[in-house]
Amino acid sequence: MRFSKLLIFLVVAVALRAHGVPPYERGILTAENAADYLAQVEAQRQVPEGFQSELMSVALGCYPPLSQDEVQTEDLASLDPHAGKERARVLTWLFSHSATLDRNELMAKVLKFDPDTSVREAAAKDLVVFKRLPTSLFELVVQKMGEDLDAEVRLALVLSLSVLHADMSADQRSLFEEALQRLSTGDVSPHVMNEAACALRLAQSVTP
């Protein structure tokens, strides 16, 4: 009897605690809490608890970029592509020098991370978080959003792009909103559809 009462008490306590935590801190982005979420992101320059994804961390500048002296072309292939922080820092470095890099050369560097196709594609997807992304590469990554991606990867893409939406060009913004529209009505899980629909409403609400 005492055990049952204790169990009930714990369940109620956990439920009350969960109810008091903002949804975005529980990893749930809704149309209602999106503005608060982005405000917290902007104020703290860090990802709220529940969104500790590599993509979001890079997008918000949580990883300092490597200097040009630290990374040379031949070094990229030796890095562990599964080490999120290493890949994030290298990609940050690449884009900090993107003005002086040919687009094809840039992609060639990214694709040197690992011979495994899935890892190369993961590295390519990471490119989407950078504000200086060339439109041609942006189009490529947005197209990937409509493919059979892992739900977590897809959600990270959606959230990362939402944060950067205000900095997109008109063409990029149009592509992004079209991709979200397809996701929100596509053949994906209800969770992804909901997140995409919320992100679309958020993106449209902050359009300059």
Image: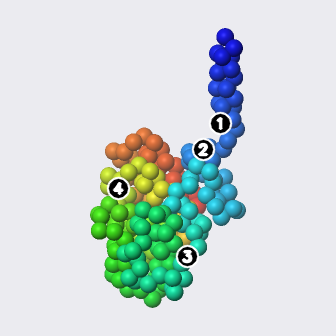
Residue 140 in view in this figure = no
Indicate the amino acid at tag 2. Answer: Arg
Q: Are marks 2 and 1 in contact (CB under 8 Å)?
A: yes
Q: Is residue 91 above or below residue 205?
A: below
Q: CA distance from mark 3 to mark 4?
A: 30 Å
Mark 2 or mark 3: which is in front?
Answer: 3
| Mark 4 or 2, nearer chain start | 2
Q: What is the quadrant of residue 176 in the picture?
A: bottom left
Residue found at x 52% / y 49%:
198
First in sequence: mark 2 vs mark 1: 1
Q: What mark, if any, has residue 71 been given in the picture?
A: none
Circle 3/circle 4 CB separation < 8 Å: no
Q: Earlier in the sequence, mark 1 or mark 4?
A: 1
Q: Residue type at mark 4?
A: Gly
Q: Residues within 10 Å of mark 1 (few under 14, many from 20)?
A: few
From the top left corner, tell me how far across and down residue 124 is, in percent. 38, 68
* Amino acid carrying mark 3 in the image: Pro
Residue 145 rendering spot, x and y as whole percentages: 38, 58
Pointer 1 residue: 18
Which mark is first along the chain, 3 or 2?
2
- Left or right: where does residue 96 sit relative to residue 8? left
Residue identifier under label 4 = 146
SS class of the residue under badge 1?
A: helix
